[in-house]
Amino acid sequence: MRTPTSGADLLAGLAARWRRRRDLAAAVVAVCAGVAVAAATHAWLGPASSLPAGLVAAVGAGLAARLRWPAVGPDAVARHLNRTTPPLEESAELLLRPPEQLGVVGRLQRARVEAAVSPLLRTLPRLPHRPLRLAVLLG
């Protein structure tokens, strides 16, 4: 990931990273489900039906896992950072709006938030990784 230059870039980059991690978790779930169903089908029905059954199970499990999780965008990352990063003072959403659309108080608060985000630009904050952890446990 390239180094973000502003708070909005940081939020967009984190959202993309979060989506990639969730896609990886869905792929792990799909592979594990496909292998498990193929092995069971091979043992019960023979080798001829194990590959199609495994592929159907993999596609179904991957889609179910992927569609189960809601969409992640910069606004979801801003809400997550509000919950987990106290210096942002519950105002990370201000980074998503252009300064011209904010009033005087909004601009002041945005400047405070950008100052608090500056350290985050060097060390990216941790994103929730529950879907990946769950996928590895299920596999």
Image (cartoon, grey):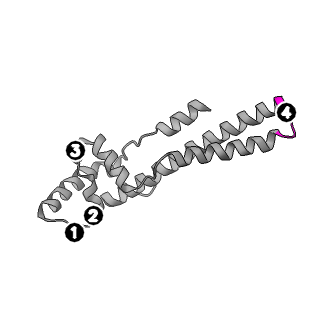
Residue 79 relative to residue 33: left or right: left
> Disc 1 marks which residue?
101
Give the mark nearest the N terminus, 4 or 1: 4
Magenta span contains residue 131: no
Give the mark nearest the N terminus, 2 or 4: 4
Residue 99 relative to residue 77: left or right: left
Q: Amino acid at mark 1?
A: Gln
Residue at position x 20%, y 46% in the image: 89
Instruction: Determine the main secondary structure of the stretch shown in magenta.
Output: loop
Under circle 1, the secondary element is: helix
Query: Depth-wise, is mark 3 or mark 1 nearer the camera?
Result: 1
Q: Amino acid at mark 4?
A: Leu
Give the mark nearest the N terminus, 3 or 1: 3
Q: CA distance from mark 4 to mark 3?
A: 59 Å
Q: Residues within 10 Å of mark 3 (few under 14, many from 20)?
A: some
Q: Residues within 10 Å of mark 2 (few under 14, many from 20)?
A: few
Answer above or below: position of 4 versus 57.
Answer: below
Residue at position x 42%, y 40% in the image: 128
Give the mark nearest the N terminus, 3 or 2: 3
Under circle 3, the secondary element is: helix
Q: Point out which mark residue 45 bears.
A: 4
Q: Point out which mark residue 97 bears.
A: 2
Q: Position of residue 120 (x, y in %)?
A: 31, 48
> Disc 3 marks which residue?
87
